[in-house]
Structure formats: structure tokens, C-alpha cells
Amino acid sequence: SGVAYSSSGSDADYTLGRFGAALETDLTLVLPYLETEFDSGATGRAMLGIGSGEATITQTDKRQGSADLSVYMLSAGGSWPTAWEIGSAELSWSGDFGYTSLSTSGSALPSLDGLSVSSMQLRGGMELTFEELGYGWKTAPRAALLMRLDSGDGVTGTGFEFTGGMLMSSGSSERFSVDVNLRTLIMHSAEELTDWGASIQFRLSPFGDGSGLGFALGPHWGAPEGDGLLDRDEAFRLDEASRQSRQMRGRERGLAANLGYGLRAFGGMLTPYSEYRFTSGEHGSIRQLAGVRFSNSDALEFSLFSERHIARLGQARSRLAVELQKRY
């Protein structure tokens, strides 16, 4: 369990016929979350998001106005093993639910006052996971077929999603692994809707105590789902509530890499590390990160790093950050 905090800003220009405007938003979010695993093998997760901010609009007729932003989000999901087994594979029920609502109030400009947008997505289906197969190289395939319901503003309708993947690891130490993931929308009642993502990652993990060299490298296509509750990009992009943005991001492709080396120092593990992520396309960017991470146990971790983000059109911003993480 924990609480995440996010502060973000965005700029946008738009035209409607012969009218146009520039829109700026600032948004702050607080997101308490919980993940749990039961003795039966069932898992559950939930996140609640509450946010507020301000939107400022400047019209082509030089009129300017501001409005208060309010954001609410709810996300929940989990999996439940069934009693059915197919050979070495286990069948589970899997599902998740997400809801986002954004509204404006308190503006003297009619174009900005009383706006409201919301979206909801519900997915549910069956997931098939296989035990590790092989000896020298171990392979663990997985696949799921989910029914999907989209409602609210933006894309609406029903469809089916397929997700699949395979994790391959070498030897008893399992230091080297290859992880392949695929997610695609098979069909949807909304015309011309595409939503897919794929990635492959090659990873060399440090030794069991965290020492030694570790790196990961791999390309990705489209908008793949994150592995963890807070890894989902949408959790921190709630001001882009329309799911049309996922269709645009489906044309992206890129490369991600990270490198680190763990050293025994100061009574714990000191790891200098670097990360790099390149994304092409209309919304592409380059993210570079370098820093050092210290951990004196599995429960406490301290990181100091610098980050540089280069957006399309050459716009760049940098920051210096300190992170402290405590697990219970």
C-alpha cells in the first residue's frame, strides 16, 4: 500500500472553424493505492485518484479566462484462479475497471465554464498461465482473452482484447532473461479504432544480493501496458481523458535501456545507474536519466538522480530529484 503524488502541466492550441485559442492546464493529483495477494493465489489491486488544478484559455479575440479543474479516478482489478487445469497450465478469471472524470467550474468565459468529460473501461475474461517449461532454458508462456466495454465521452462500444507473452530465462541463476509481450484489440464496435502494443526486452540481472552488472535493452511498439499499478501511463495523464490519445500513440515505436552496477559500500548496496528511453512519432520524446541508488535492506531505498526530457520540436526540460522508498 502507499500514496503517489503527481504534479503536471500542459499547453495546447486548437481551432474550431475560424475561432481558435491557447489552453494551459496545471494539475495536482494524490493517488492512494493498495495491492494484495491471497493464500489461494488470487490477487487484487485498487487505486483512488483525487486532483485539482487550473485551466487558462486565451482566445484569438484576446479574451482570457481561467477555471478550476477537478479530477476523480477509480481503478480496480484482480485475478482469481479456477479449479481447471490444462496440462501444466492454470486457468484464471481476470478483470479490471477504470473510471476517470474531469470537470471545470468558476469561469466567466462560456467556452470554459461547466465543461465535463468522463470515461470508463471495464475488462474481463480468462487468463492462461503455464509453468516453466524446459531445463537449460526455462520458458513461461501466458495468454489472455478479455471482453472490453468502453463508455462515456470519446470512444464507446464493446470489443475483445488479446494479450500474450513469454518469459525465457537461462540456467538455475536466471540472470539472463528475454521477455516478449503483445497486446492487441481484436475487434471493436467503434469503427477504425486501433489499440495495440508490443515489446521485447533482454535483461541481465545482478546477483541475488544486488551486486554486479545489470542491464536491460529492448524495443517497443504502440502503447503496451505497464506491469505494475503505478506503471500505467494513464495514471498520471488524467488531463488527457479521451481514449483517442491511445489511438494516436499506437503509431509510436521506440527503444528503452537501463544499466547499473551494484557495489557493497556504507553497510549496504550502492548502485550507480543510467536509463534511456526514445519514443518516435508525433508525440515522441527522449528521456535520459543518470544517478545513484542506495539500499541497506530490501525495505529501504534512496535514490538521487538527474533527468532530462527532450520533447518533439526540440523542447527540453531538466530536473534533479531525490526519492526515498520504504516497504513494509
Image (spheres, grey):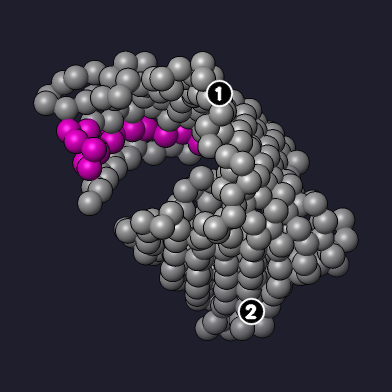
Image-quadrant location for residue 113: bottom right
Q: Is residue 290 left or right of residue 59?
A: left
* Residue located at (51% from left, 60% from top): 80
Can you tell which mark lies on residue 134?
1
Say which element carries label 1: loop
Given the image, on which type of amino acid does mark 2 rest? Leu
The residue lying toward the viewer, choosing from 311 and 83, is: 83
Region in magenta? 295-311
The residue lying toward the viewer, choosing from 214 and 140, is: 140
Q: Mark 2 and mark 1: span between their CA atoms?
A: 57 Å
Q: Is residue 41 above or below residue 47?
A: above
Q: Position of residue 72 (x, y in %)?
A: 50, 73
Given the image, on which type of amino acid does mark 1 rest? Gly
Can you tell which mark lies on residue 202?
none
* Residue located at (64% from left, 79% from top): 115
Q: Is residue 221 above or below residue 144?
A: above
The furthest residue to the left: 267
Mark 2 highlights which residue?
115
Q: Position of residue 7 (x, y in %)?
A: 42, 57
Q: Position of residue 286 (x, y in %)?
A: 57, 32
* Residue located at (25% from left, 48% from top): 327
- Magenta-drawn stretch contains 191: no
